[in-house]
Image: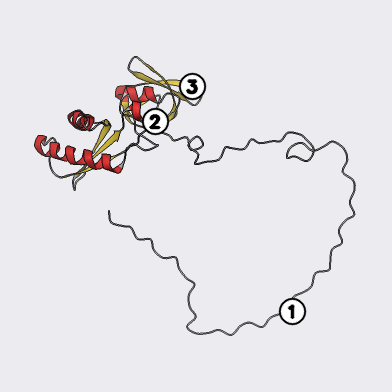
Amino acid sequence: MSDKAVQIANLLAPTVHALGLELLGAEYLPAPGGATVRLYIEVPEAELASRMVGIEDCEAVSREVSAQLDVEDPITGNYTLEVSSPGVDRPLFSLAQFQRHRGESAKVVLRLPQDGRRRLQGSILRIEAGSIVFQVDNAEMTVAFENIDKARIIPDWVALGFAAQPRKSGGTGKTGETGAKPAGKTPDRPAAKKKPARKAAPRKPAPKQSGQAKPNQPAAKRSRAE
């Protein structure tokens, strides 16, 4: 997170906690027309199996946080507040969250290049002395937590039930199944007789017509104003 996002998260975390929720982290996205403050909330880890973040939770956090931001005023100028659950491609904001999602894959953007790259994608193996060890391209890569700008979990769509299991190539080698064919020579089959092709009768060219309609063109896509 940026320094401003960390400041906002530290300021609002006790308010979110008082509502029985956890503030995973914040994003602060400045823009010429006004900044966007995005908060990600989650139910406590002990309640994950029986409870999920709902619209009512987001609305309650938005009300309380808006009032606090008006009083504390940590943001200069106009801003838009967004409160949401993390989703399946949840962002990771702390070492504890990386620890919680060991074994899962993540996309990471680095603050400074490491090993000639600013982006990486790999499995989270373990946490070591303030760093995260990833498995990237069949090799381990250790990244200091302070050098991580953004990180998100890559959803396992197969485990979530949104994609089918990949089929294994090849077969069992049994007769009648896809795979190896039984040994032996295939019996000769009589060649199929070809019918003589018929020549199409020549057609007269159609007379030209004036004012002929042009072929339909695809409709232009219209963007919806947010």
Disc 1 vs disc 2: which is toward the camera?
A: 2
Callout 3 touching callout 2 (CB < 8 Å): no
What kind of residue is marked 2?
Answer: Ala
Earlier in the chain: of badge 3 and badge 2, it is: 2
Query: Which residue is at a point 49% across and 72% down the rendered structure image?
Result: 215
Q: Considering depth in this image, is 193 or 106 the residue closer to the camera?
A: 106
On screen, residue 163 versus residue 94, left or right, reads right
What kind of residue is marked 3?
Answer: Ala
Query: Which residue is at a point 18% across and 41% down the rendered structure image?
Result: 63
Question: Quick one: label 1, few (<14), some, or many (20+) residues within 10 Å?
Answer: few
| Percent of width and height locating residue 25 | 27, 31
What kind of residue is marked 1?
Answer: Ala
Query: Real-space Cα distance between discs 1 and 2?
Result: 74 Å
Residue, disc 1: 201
Residue, disc 3: 139
Disc 3 vs disc 2: which is toward the camera?
A: 2
Secondary structure type for disc 3: strand
Secondary structure type for disc 2: loop
Query: Real-space Cα distance between discs 3 and 2?
Result: 34 Å
